[in-house]
Amino acid sequence: MKNKLFDLAIIFIGYVVCIYSMVITWNLLIETNIFVRLLACHVEATIFIYILSVAFKNSSWYDAFWSVIPVVLTILCWIDIHAAGNVLRAGMMFDVMVFWAIRLTYNWARSWDGFTHEDWRYVMMKGKAKNKFEYFLTDFGAIHLIPTLSVFMALLPMNYTLYYPGPEVFWLDWVAYAIGISAVFIQIISDQQMYNFRRTLIEPQTMQSGLWFYSRHPNYLGEILFWFSFFIFSLSNGLAASWLIIGTITMYALVAITSVAMMDSRSLQRRHDFKDYMDTTPAIFFNFFKRKA
């Protein structure tokens, strides 16, 4: 436990310095287009964390990036002198964002075992590299940069809504707010159910109770709905903002297609009961008509 707390303290310090570097980058590009600045800060932070990953020989440095950096980016966007989004709407979006970030950071911190542990997906992906160049492309490109670009796209609806003026809050905003908060609750419940299950697990078995009975990846459903809620918020600017659905589509591709394929492939290899579960349970969306055998 002491080693884990020490390692978490190192992670904390690393991210504090990373955020400071983002602020410097932001100020250096103060006259640049808002979205160019956001992208530059996002990529610069990715490079910073990648360097730490290489130094510590552990790509799980990037795990906390997923929940910490989006909050920083949206704050930078909101406090920009030219930001003109509706204040109440911005507050509602930040409620959803911070609620999600706290939940995700907490779930990662309690499950991470320190620098002795590295996400199995990272290990598997890097293990397939045949030379140093392929290793770099995998480590920096696939593990760090591609997820960063995906999150940048998923953040577009929120940042667009923060930056450009919109009407007063109306019923559609409350729908978006309800979807976002509900999405995080789905994640909290599914996370806790899986956490409890793993603590009592003796041999490889498939979690098939609670929300996991109706969906193979209810936590991923919550993730997709969370990002979708910001697209709904952006529609307050009218149908002209419909193109921002690209953010939700990008996140769906990353989570519901890529991550699900990797998780299911591994489960098929490790769990004897997963094939039957996979055949009777949808990957993402709940099947509330499913009945116990």
Image (spheres, grey):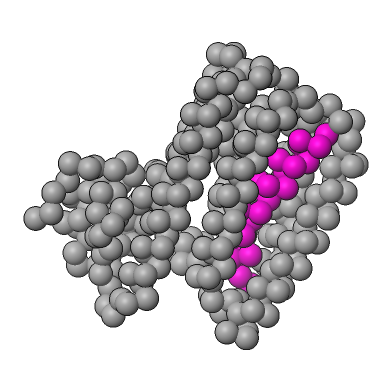
Using the image, determine if residue 16 lies above or below residue 236: below
Q: Is residue 39 left or right of residue 110?
A: right
Q: Which residue appears at 84% of the width and 26% of the height?
A: 82
Using the image, determine if residue 272 lies above or below residue 222: below
Q: Is residue 283 left or right of residue 165?
A: left
Q: Quadrant of the N terminus?
A: bottom right
9 or 274, which is in the foreground? 9
Using the image, determine if residue 283 lies above or below residue 248: below
Indicate the quadrant where residue 231 lies: top right
| Residue 41 location (% of width, % of height) | 77, 44
Residue 43 showing in the rendered view: no
| Residue 280 location (% of width, % of height) | 17, 49
Indicate the quadrant where residue 14 lies: bottom right
| Residue 114 location (% of width, % of height) | 58, 76
Farthest residue, direction left: 293
Q: Which residue appears at 32% of the width and 77% of the height?
A: 200
Q: Which residue appears at 83% of the width and 55% of the height?
A: 20
Total numbered labels placed on residues in the image = 0
Using the image, determine if residue 61 lies above or below residue 72: below
Q: Quadrant of the C terminus?
A: bottom left
The stretch drawn in magenta includes residue 67: yes
Residue 129 showing in the rendered view: yes
| Residue 35 location (% of width, % of height) | 74, 31
Q: Which residue appears at 36% of the width and 63% of the height?
A: 193
Determine the main secondary structure of the stretch shown in magenta: helix
Farthest residue, direction bottom: 2
Q: Which residues are magenta?
A: 57-80
29 or 186, which is in the foreground? 186
The stretch drawn in magenta includes residue 218: no
